Image (cartoon, grey):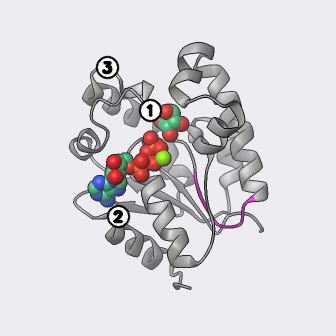
Amino acid sequence: MSGPLVVLVGPMGVGKSTVGQLLAERLGTGYRDTDDDIVAARGRTIAEIFVDEGEPVFRALEKDAVRDALAGHTGVLALGGGAVLDPDTRALLRDRRVVYLSMDVEEAVKRTGLSAARPLLAVNPRKQWRALMDARRHLYEEVATVVVATDGRTPEDVTRAVLDALELKEA
Ligand SMILES: Nc1ncnc2c1ncn2[C@@H]1O[C@H](COP(=O)(O)OP(=O)(O)OP(=O)(O)O)[C@@H](O)[C@H]1O
Ligand SMILES: O=C(O)C1=C[C@@H](O)[C@@H](O)[C@H](O)C1
Ligand SMILES: [Mg+2]
């Protein structure tokens, strides 16, 4: 199947963008991120879209962005943390090489803090994160070819673990 060499999924702040870019370098390929595609197409930040237009509008934009990127990108693709909520998106991920980057709640708080740039974690991040993961963990697992735990690992270590888990060779 054509499309991305590797697709990264997982919660906010797990390192999809950081690891995705490192992975793309190691594989000698391009990196793309559906959050960036949405921001570029709209000329607004994710937080602005959530606040001014609402989450349903963001999810519709995200669904289209993911479909386009899965069809048009051949390198490493990172999806937004909530992209797997959509059943059509999950169907499009079937038979692709999908990596679920995971972490526990303490690691999540360390990485995301109270950042207002992540609107879903802006208030009481620990509780919000637990609730998001209770709703989504099984969806990440459903689409994943492999799960790579990132707790206590550097981005370089995680990148190496992804290459090993997928048995991919560096370029
Ligand atoms: N393995 C790691 N160890 C420690 N810090 C990390 C690791 N990976 C990423 N980080 C840091 O955690 C923060 C979040 O990383 P990043 O933006 O790559 O996550 P993300 O999964 O793309 O998040 P989002 O879903 O919000 O786009 C950044 O400050 C990054 O430097
Ligand atoms: O987990 C989520 O629902 C989100 C994750 C981010 O990547 C962004 O797509 C946005 O902040 C929503
Ligand atoms: Mg990101």
The amino acid type found where label 1 is placed reads Ala
- Asked if residue 56 lies left or right of residue 13, the reply is right
Q: CA–CA distance between discs 1 and 3?
A: 18 Å
- Sequence order check, earlier mark of 2 and 3: 3
Q: Residue at x 63, y 67 (%)?
A: 30
Residue tagged 2: 155
x then y, percent, for residue 19: 44, 61
Residue interval drawn in magenta: 73-78
Q: Are marks 2 and 3 in contact (CB under 8 Å)?
A: no
Residue tagged 3: 123
x then y, percent, for residue 157: 32, 71
- The picture quadrant where one finds residue 94 is bottom right
Q: Secondary structure at mark 2?
A: helix
- Asked if residue 96 lies left or right of residue 171, the reply is right
Residue 135 circle label: 1
- Sequence order check, earlier mark of 1 and 2: 1
- Sequence order check, earlier mark of 1 and 3: 3
The quadrant in which the C terminus is found is: bottom right
Local crowd size for mark 3, using a 10 Å CA cut-off: few (<14), some (14–19), many (≥20): few
